Amino acid sequence: MDQYKKEFIEFMVDSEVLTFGDFTTKSGRKTPFFINAGNYKSGRQLSLLGDYYAKAIKENFGTDFQILFGPAYKGIPLSVTTSVSLSKSYGADIAYCSNRKEQKDHGDVGGFLGAKLQDGDKIIIIEDVTTAGTSIYETMPLLKSAANVNVLGLIISVDRMEKGRGEQSALKELADAFNIETCAIVTMEEVVGYLHNRAIDGRVYIDDEIKSSIDAYYEIYGAKE
């Protein structure tokens, strides 16, 4: 595993973004682990987060695109901090854009923040995590209704590697449904492999008991590629 992936996993647990216990996902699944990008709060955390996303984008997509689109609400800070990191680290002047949950009827009117979408724009969508892909199924029609844009791909922080709407993973379903590339900074397989019985600052986040719970979860929800 690349060093930056190991650092990112430790960064997530240190930021209390990746936690273990009993949770319910947006799709209603009971899960022994949870990823909540809303817990990135400080300027330092957001700056580092943008750097990790920017590195993964550079490796998987390059920088030949115009807009980084972050679906509201969590995608807004993700798109902003990552566009800053792409400029700082790779000299790529990528604009950010996000949708509004409510249409604005005064001042800067319309349904989007940031860059104005134009025909031919190449776009990468940035999200924190996707379980069933619901937000992307909602986002794609919004983008296509705004302009004849070219959505190249989707990047998320962690690939949960579980079933989407069918038997395949949500990322694979989205790739097939919209003919886009999908990737993650790390996969849950990488997370579990790295953290199992490994102490981070004196604490083991995935012991044998939690590992068994995760294995049992994937027996039910694990994607079949």
Image (cartoon, rainbow, N blue to C red):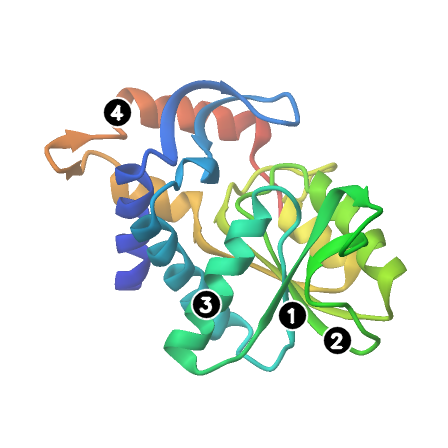
Relative horizontal placement of residue 86, taking residue 167 as reference (left or right)? left
Q: Amino acid at mark 4?
A: Asp
Of residues 107 and 84, the one nearer the viewer is 107
Q: Please state which of the two labelled residues, at mark 4 or mark 1, is closer to the viewer.
A: 1
Relative horizontal placement of residue 157, taking residue 7 as reference (left or right)? right
Residue 84 vertical placement versus 74 (above, below): below
| Quadrant the N terminus occupies | bottom left
Of residues 32 and 100, the one nearer the viewer is 100
Q: Please state which of the two labelled residues, at mark 4 or mark 2, is closer to the viewer.
A: 2
Q: Please state which of the two labelled residues, at mark 3 or mark 2, is closer to the viewer.
A: 3
Q: Amino acid at mark 3?
A: Val
Q: Which one is earlier in the sequence, the residue at label 4 or at label 1?
A: 1
Dot 2 and dot 1 residues touching (CB under 8 Å): yes
Of residues 54 and 22, the one nearer the viewer is 54
Dot 3 and dot 2 residues touching (CB under 8 Å): no
Q: Is residue 1 visible?
A: no
Q: Residue at x 60, y 40 (%)?
A: 223
CA–CA distance between discs 4 and 2?
48 Å
In the rendered image, which residue does mark 2 sit on?
121
SS class of the residue under badge 3? helix
SS class of the residue under badge 1? strand
Disc 1 residue crowd, few under 14, some 14–19, many 20+, Cα 10 Å:
many
Q: Quadrant of residue 167?
A: top right
In the rendered image, which residue does mark 4 sit on?
208
In the rendered image, which residue does mark 1 sit on?
67
Q: Position of residue 84 (x, y in %)?
A: 45, 67
